[in-house]
Image: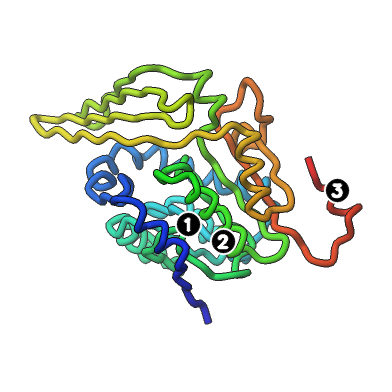
Amino acid sequence: MNTTIHDDELKNNRSRHEKEWFQDERFWDEFAPFMFDEARWAMAETEVEQIRVLSGVEPPAKVLDLCCGVGRHSLAFARRGFTVTGVDLTASYLEAAKESAAAENLEIEFIHEDGRAFRRPGEFALCVDLGASFGYFSNADDDALMLRRCQENLAAGGVLVLETIGKETAARAFVESETVERDGWTVSARYRVLGDWEKLGNAWRAEKEGTVYERSFAIRLYAGTELRSLLLGAGFETAALYGDLDGRPYDQRAEMLVAVARKPEPGRNKLQRSGRRR
């Protein structure tokens, strides 16, 4: 039977911090129309197929979709026959995801939980953390904790696919501000570098017919080598880096920073392990 174990390490960490910016559901509710438009929904099918190829994991394997949001990828995995569990902190997003799954008669388990606390040791063949949902925590130790949870929740030989904004790509494509028009809304964003490229500061503003939403937050950035070291330190055996989910190299043309990390398989000899390193 599936069980969720709550972790004292996270409870101790929480006591050190005030409420984190991403725990404010108003932020996600207010900006949902701009983050999950039709184009982003349509991308999910292609992205999930790319993840299947990158990871080598096939249905009906169990998939853990961390920070699943409104369930775009959870739904796409389920349509392919995977057994899916989606985890997110935003209750309204999970309700929307459940409604979408029910409309398609898809059996998906959605859980309202913090990814740092969610534990089902050895349960999943594949864990995904997509859409640059990594690096949100005010304490960098919590990033490492999140990765340890991913490793723990994977079965032997299981795979983590993590998509985030690389420090290199953020520096190459940096702009101080940008503005888009979407469904009658004027959405603007201002960016700034914090702490010697430790974080990318964001200030978002959306305005329509006198209604204004404004939010500020920061995301911790990792260079490719830093993220690989973090993954290996979390107990993964290998951590290959790519420039997007399509498997392109992580080089000067990279769009995102994608890591594909594999949990060790007990019983394989050293020669086999060294052959899979990159």
What residue sits 36% from the left and 17% below the top? 176
Question: Dot 3: few (<14), some (14–19), or many (≥20) neighbours within 10 Å?
Answer: few
* Rendering coords of residue 197 (x, y %): 48, 26
Contact, mark 1 vs mark 2 (Cβ under 8 Å): yes
The mark lying in front, picked from 2 and 3, is 3
x and y percentages locating residue 88 in the rendered image: 39, 57
Query: From this viewpoint, which residue is outermost toward the bottom?
Result: 1
| Mark found first going from the N terminus, 1 or 3 | 1
Horizontal side, residue 222 vs residue 24: left or right: right
Seen from the viewer's position, the closer of residues 181 and 142 is 142
Residue designated by label 1 = 74
The circle on residue 274 is 3
**Which secondary structure, mark 3?**
helix
Q: Which mark is residue 63?
A: 2
Residue 149 located left or right of residue 210: right
Crowding at dot 1, Cα within 10 Å, few <14 / some 14-19 / many 20+, comes out as: many
